[in-house]
Amino acid sequence: MFLNPVLNQMKTVEPPKQRPSRSSRKERSDKIKDVKIPLSAVSWGFLRQYKNKLALQDPDICLTDSNTHLLITAILDAEKSPDLIPEVVYDAKLEFVTCKPTVYYREKMDALCILWNTRSVRKVAHRLMSYAIAKEGGPGAETLDSRKNKSDDSSGPVIKIYS
């Protein structure tokens, strides 16, 4: 009981009701999740040329769309035969390219993470994108197999070459 009679007449405030958790809702099948892939400047140049080639057919296409197109073709190739995609040297200090695959293809990339024994979706995306660029005739990243062969031939340090 309060000395002030106004305070005695006030009702107590009930705590707010808890909202149901959002995890019960389904995710849209066409939702897009960004993937940022580190690539060299030479690969960036090839991606711009590839975008210009696609822009002849569809003038409204942007660089992100063409990158996503390349990534999806590589995911479909990896789905058929995952051993076809060679391991590449991953360097996270390069410039990033943006791809926007749908949830369906992102789940396929998660499956490839498990298959290739890596935790990073970005590493898998880098491996797939390097394969797709090399398949289209562009400069590929250095593969780990070629790196091992170079280190067997020479006693010097291994240098990453992106050409």
Image: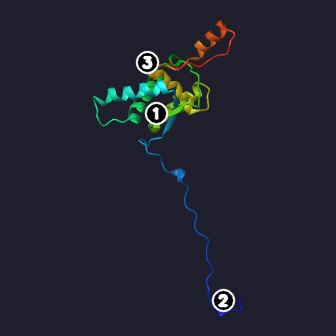
The residue that disc 2 covers is 8
- State whether residue 151 is above or below residue 25: above
Q: Residues within 10 Å of mark 2 (few under 14, many from 20)?
A: few
What label does residue 3 carry, if any? none
Q: Earlier in the sequence, mark 1 or mark 3?
A: 1
- State whether residue 32 is above or below residue 143: below
Front residue (pair 84, 134):
134
The residue that disc 1 covers is 105
- Identify residue type, mark 3: Lys
Label 1 vs label 3: CA separation?
A: 20 Å
- Identify residue type, mark 2: Asn
Residue 91 as seen in the image, left or right of residue 69: right
Q: Which quadrant of the figure contains the N terminus?
A: bottom right
Label 1's element?
Answer: helix
Q: Position of residue 15 (x, y in %)?
A: 62, 71
What label does residue 135 carry, if any? 3
| Residue at 37% over, 26% down | 50
- Identify residue type, mark 1: Tyr
Residue 66 as seen in the image, left or right of residue 97: left
Front residue (pair 55, 2):
55
